[in-house]
Image (cartoon, coloured by chain):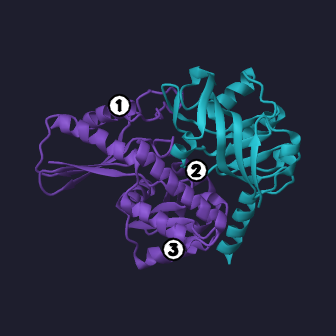
Amino acid sequence: MREKVVEATVRALQRAETSLPDWVLQRIEEAAVRESHPLARHHLQFMLENVLIAGERGLPLCQDTGLAVFHVQMGRDLILDFSLSEAIAEGVRIATKKIPLRPNAVHPQTRQNSGDNTGPGMPDIILDYVDGTGLTLTAFPKGAGSENMSLIGMLNPADDPFDFILRSVAERAANACPPLFLGIGLGGSFDLAARLAKRALLNMPGESQEELQLLERINSLGIGPMGLGGDTTALGIKIEKAFCHTASLPVAINFQCWANRSATEVIQ
Amino acid sequence: MTEYHLHTPLSDADVQKLVAGDVVFLSGPLFTARDKAHALMRRAGCPVSLDGAALYHCGPLILDNRVLSAGPTTSGRMARYTDEILGLGVRAIIGKGGLPGEPFQNRAVYLAYPGGCGAAAAQQLQIRGVHLPELGMAESLWEFEAKEFGPMIVAVDAHGKDLYQEVRRSAQRRELS
């Protein structure tokens, strides 16, 4: 079983780094048809060409192969006689050499690079329990360009959280490689809001009416692909909510660039 | 909007003719530098001549002396170094997300390469050499040979025009309305 987890980790990373999920690709393709600004359209087409080149040659789409983030759904009846995080870390070390990945993980102060994308706290594993005995592993490599633009606002309950989101996107989108996917955590506490925002990115696709309206407002800002103007500023948005204190209104925005990479492996 | 195919090192005339919104493809030597290389150059000086150079904000993915993926990184992190880097003779900074336009006035341009397009960029780059290799793969000062590297958009020109700022200001006006 341990060997299966290691191998699934390598396979998931390989796929996540060199291709995009179908639904992501489809949204970029649709935007390239819809987009009315010629420069913005060219950018979207170049992004699609990049995906094609990466797929044909087995190359990472982006040189920023990201921080190793994983989402694991583990069967409640599954008993493991090994450390899951150690097995995934071993997969990351193998993938770093094999794919290869750029070594990105460094000590936060000395900035010393471990060389293999692992270290204390890395990989970051988000764990959920589900029914059964299966194990589903999703690689979600997270690049720094978009992650660096992410933020939390501890708003006044009288504030409009959507105004905060719009203002933040207007100010920050250009650095995050738009068109964006936005994970919003609304409510909860300081740290719960951030976790909800990351989960929102993991949970995409399919927008509610409320999400579609916000998406429309964001696209009306005219920021466009790469922040150089256009109709296509965001391609997806998901809002995850939790109850919060009556005196609080936490809002977290997790920015994700257009290259919204992920790949899932199911282990029996 | 004009399309230019230019060679490095760039001349002052090359820089002066470019206007924000123009499309540029570059051929010739190209130097990468990001966070650590900038910090080290401030302390210890630059190991190469950057006279007329194009400096690429990029931390490439390299294997066996081959460029596998090499798109731009966010330039904003290096904003504090713009003035001294341009003072070394750099005539074009390449990256994504933009830089404050003021230091570029009358001497240099900022070129935006489409972010996230590392695999496509790698097809246009070969390795000539590496400086400051002790900084590691992403942070070394790589010397590339570029062949029709682009498309890049002139986002900040030498005449005071800044596309990112225009788009951001217009977005902020719309957000308030």
Residue under label 1, please give it: A93
Element carrying mark 3? helix
Question: Foreground mark, 1 or 3?
Answer: 1
Residue B149 in picture, x, y percent from top left: 65, 43
Q: Which mark is residue B115?
A: 2
Element carrying mark 1? helix
Q: Amino acid at mark 2?
A: Gly
Question: Foreground mark, 2 or 1?
Answer: 2
Q: Are marks 3 and 2 on the same chain?
A: no
Q: Nearer the viewer, residue A58 or A181?
A: A58
Q: Is residue B92 left or right of residue B11?
A: left
Mark 2 crowdedness (10 Å alpha carbons): few <14, some 14-19, many ≥20: many
Q: Amino acid at mark 1?
A: Arg
Q: Is residue B100 left or right of residue B132?
A: right
Q: Nearer the viewer, residue B83 or B13?
A: B13
In the figure, the cyan chain has which letter? B
Q: Which mark is residue A207?
A: none
Residue under label 3, please give it: A214
Measured along the vertical axis of the image, is residue A223 above or below residue B74? below
Is residue A196 visible from the viewing direction of this image? Answer: yes
> Which quarter of the rendering shows the N terminus of chain B?
bottom right
Question: Foreground mark, 3 or 2?
Answer: 2
Marks 2/1 in contact by CB < 8 Å: the verdict is: no
Q: Chain of mark 3?
A: A
Q: What whole-number distance in Å separates the C-alpha atoms at marks 1 and 3?
A: 40 Å
Identify the hue of chain A: purple
Q: Are marks 1 and 3 on the same chain?
A: yes
